[in-house]
Amino acid sequence: MPDLDTVRTQLEARLAALLAEAKEIDAELSEPHGRDWEERATESEGDEVLEGLGNAAMAEARRIQAALTRIDEGSYGTCTSCGEPVGDKRLEAVPDAALCINYASR
């Protein structure tokens, strides 16, 4: 099992970065569009990409928050589906992993 203090620090740092990124994306999406039709079409395409990035950032943030909760509850490193250990190597690769490799690959 990885050192939980180290894992917590890493997860909290990543969470802060994701929330800052999401805030920047929200600010960018709030900016008014240009008046030119072609410019607006290009900006709309860019907005779709930004929305996708923002959604991905928030999904990762939710996974990290859940991992932090599991650390607090003492269940970090245990598969949330089967109760078996997630595995040290998997947790090193994916610190917010909630599932063992067997359930994650389903």
Image (cartoon, rainbow, N blue to C red):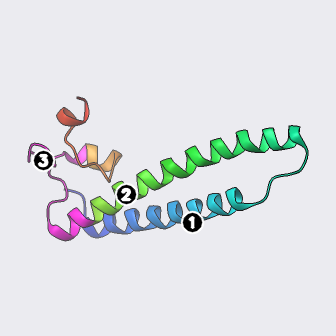
Residue 11 x %, y %: 38, 62
Left-right relation of 28 to 75 = right
> Residue visible at 26% across and 44% down?
89
Task: Give the number of the disc on residue 104.
Answer: none
Task: Give the number of the disc on residue 85.
Answer: 3
Which quadrant would the N terminus be assigned to in this image? bottom left
Q: Main secondary structure of the magenta part?
A: loop
Which quadrant would the C terminus be assigned to in this image? top left
Residue hosting label 2 = 62
Residue 30 x %, y %: 70, 61
Residue hosting label 1 = 20
Q: Is residue 32 magenta?
A: no
Q: Amino acid at mark 3?
A: Pro
> Residue visible at 25% across and 64% down?
3
Circle 3 residues within 10 Å: few <14, some 14–19, many ≥20: some
Depth check, front residue: 33 or 67: 33
Q: Residue furthest right?
A: 36
Circle 1 residues within 10 Å: few <14, some 14–19, many ≥20: few
Depth check, front residue: 60 or 36: 36
Q: Which residues are magenta?
A: 69-89
Depth check, front residue: 73 or 28: 28
Depth check, front residue: 10 or 105: 105
